[in-house]
Image (cartoon, rainbow, N blue to C red):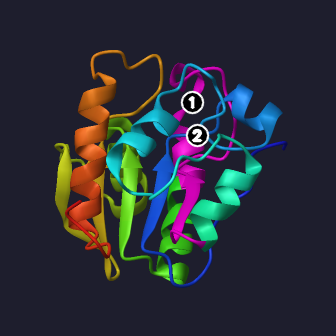
Amino acid sequence: MNTLPDYLCNGLTIVSVGLNPSLPSVREGFYFANPRNRFWRALQASGLTDRILEPGVEAMDVLLRRYKIGFTDVVKRPTAGSKELRAADYREGAPRLKQKLLQYQPDVVWFHGKLACNNYLKYAEGISQGVDWGAQTHRIGITRMFVTPNPSPANAAYSLDDLGRWYRQLGIYSSRPGWPP
């Protein structure tokens, strides 16, 4: 299966977890590659980095090595949209994600969207209770959980300013040096 690679290693502060890779991201070879996706602009507005990063594979490497932010997905199968995912995808992907998080033990796992987090919890943890935005009480091993709105263009209910505010809250929650900005 052609998909995005994980950007994971030991010593990460944050691991960003999307629902699954988009077709544009797989084609371009990096996360949030759709030019209409607001991730990169929200990241720049958040203060999680101290410089503007141009979307691309090089930026992914910088986020991993300099800022200790990793990337993966609940489901690794790329689709044009979340409606193409099935329960079997989550049954396969969520436990694998849990294994990765337990292996690398980042400080915080950052779920992009309630759908990603709820499906992880249901299929990896057996928890059917819904989540809200922000910090969660559940932990994955020692890893704390945080949920922000998905920056996908399909999630227009949340503005770029809203996303930037949630990303700043993530920075505070993760206790990154220099927070709050």
Residue at horizontal 82 percent and vertical 32 percent from the top: 27
Q: Position of residue 70 (x, y in %)?
A: 55, 64
Which label sits on residue 20?
Answer: 2
Does the segment drawn in magenta span residue 85?
yes
Between 62 and 104, the one lying in front of the other is 62
Helix, strand or loop status at disc 1: loop
- Residue 43: % across, % down: 43, 44
Asked if residue 62 is among those painted magenta in the image, a careful observer would answer no
Residue 85 bears which disc, if any? 1
Q: Say whether marks 2 and 1 touch (CB < 8 Å).
A: yes
Q: Which amino acid does label 2 sit on?
A: Asn
SS for callout 2: loop
Mark with earlier residue (2, 1): 2
Q: Nearer the viewer, residue 164 or 119?
A: 164
Vertical placement of 164 versus 8: above or below?
A: above
**Would you call the spot at circle 1 few (<14 residues within 10 Å), some (14-19), or many (20 or more)?**
some
Which residues are the magenta region? Answer: 66-93
- For marks 2 and 1, give the one nearer the viewer: 2
Identified at 52% across, 45% down, the residue is 90
